[in-house]
Amino acid sequence: MTPAHGAPSGHDHALPRARRPGREPVTDETVARLRVLARTDPASGLPALAEALRGRAYGEPRPRPEEAVPFLEESAAIYRTLVADGGTEHLGAAANALASLALKCSLAHADGLALAARQEAADLASRAEAARPVPDLGRAAVLRADLAHALAEAGRFDEAVDAARAVAARSRAVTEPGGSDLTRRLLDLTVLLRLAGRTEEAVAVEHEALAWLHEGRTEPDRGPVPALRAAGAALWFADLGDPAQGRLLLAEAARTCERLPARGERGDFGFLEGLRADLFARSGVRDEQAAADAPDPLALGIDPRRHLQPVLGLSFHHWSFSLRDSFRDGLVALARAVEAITGVPEQTDRLPDEDDLPEHTDGRSPLPDDPGLLAALGTLTRRLDLRRAVLGVHPASYTRIALPRLRRSVHIERRLHATDPAAGTRRLVRALTDLAMAQLVHCDHADATGTLHEAHALAG
């Protein structure tokens, strides 16, 4: 069975195996020696050469991605030869080599080659597991999930849905009732279905995911995942135009929080923050789409000259580097737009130290009086926070940076709501829900409960 938090979602599986203690680093001399062995003793020399080439691509000094790709292409070519006769001995290593090639191609912005390599890696891993079944999620499913994300980036959404459905089916078969891995797989599937324009199917999958969280549970939840998931679903249903369902989910999230200790332990911080980033990003699609349609989209963080545009809540935590760079570039444009309204510098290139954290992150800086500027600031601020989240630009200490930024958004939206309650209520509910999800990640359950109750009351 998979662990409660599920398997890692991609990059851990694309990296080469750690060098065993006492093993010499792979050098050009190592590769040259193994080339000779491959000619004189192909049975042992070819596999050794293929693995050495893969090790050389990750060796020290670390080659640039475009320099590493030829090593991995040669390694992949050798493995293709080794498995061409239908043998199974080298299938796992071949899948690893192709996954590594995909990663380096992505880093080198060779997106078409990366997609082809991901497809081949997933197929090879499937062949390996057909020959030797595994009891857990398995490499084949993980690599197929990466393939689904790459297909989505290429705009091949229906194919991406098929791949994600296969991954969800595998996770459903091996995940314990209520386990979080299937929750994460179904979340990916809802995003892909929306991108494919299949909203009704996405809603059905979302309901399945919410039901799965409670399946098989005979005692109250002790962790924040169900509350976090319900809050994120509330945002999504409101964005779909179903505020009534969103309000019900906010109430469920608040009730779940009430059953948690006031303060929890942050033992699963990485998983919780990754889940929050997915949920947060999924509810930001509308703002990103509106920016893409703006008269000057580059000024709002989207570059129309780039072939690949952000696939929200999906790709940025899966080592999709070509896309990641495009998304990161937009941080600067968004930050400058915020600065133009507030007059206060925004950090984009690094995490600020505590001493240079701008005061306006906790809402103490002056805000514009004009409702139009205030609304623009709220939207730009949320999009900036969203990009930081999905790019992994978050600190180890939520207390110093992440939470103050989300409190700033609440501060902005409170001011807008006071100016125009009819237009500002939905936005304030969204900002409060964003804050509550971060409080859950930080295990501030008591604070999250109060924030969710406030959001629920406003949503009514």
Image (cartoon, rainbow, N blue to C red):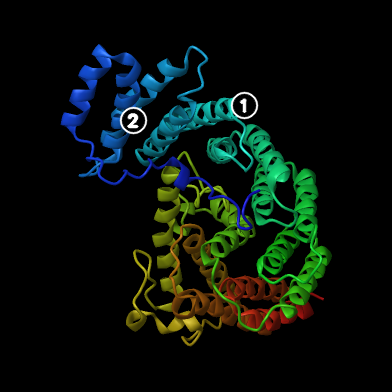
Residue farthest to the left?
A: 29
* Residue drawn at 33 percent across, 30 percent down: 51
Picture quadrant where residue 231 is located: bottom right
| Label 2, residues with CA under 10 Å away: few <14, some 14-19, many ≥20 | many
Lower sequence index among marks 2 and 1:
2
Q: Which residue was labeled with disc 1? A: 130
Residue 354 spot, x, y in % from top left: 36, 81
Question: Element at badge 2?
Answer: helix
* 294 vs 87, nearest the viewer: 87
Q: Quick check: can you spot residue 319?
A: no
Image mark count: 2
Q: Residue at x 68, y 44 (%)?
A: 171
Label 1 SS: helix
In the rendered structure, the answer to whether residue 176 lies left or right of residue 263 reads: right
Q: Would you call the spot at circle 1 few (<14 residues within 10 Å), some (14-19), or many (20 or more)? A: few
x%, y% of residue 238?
75, 63
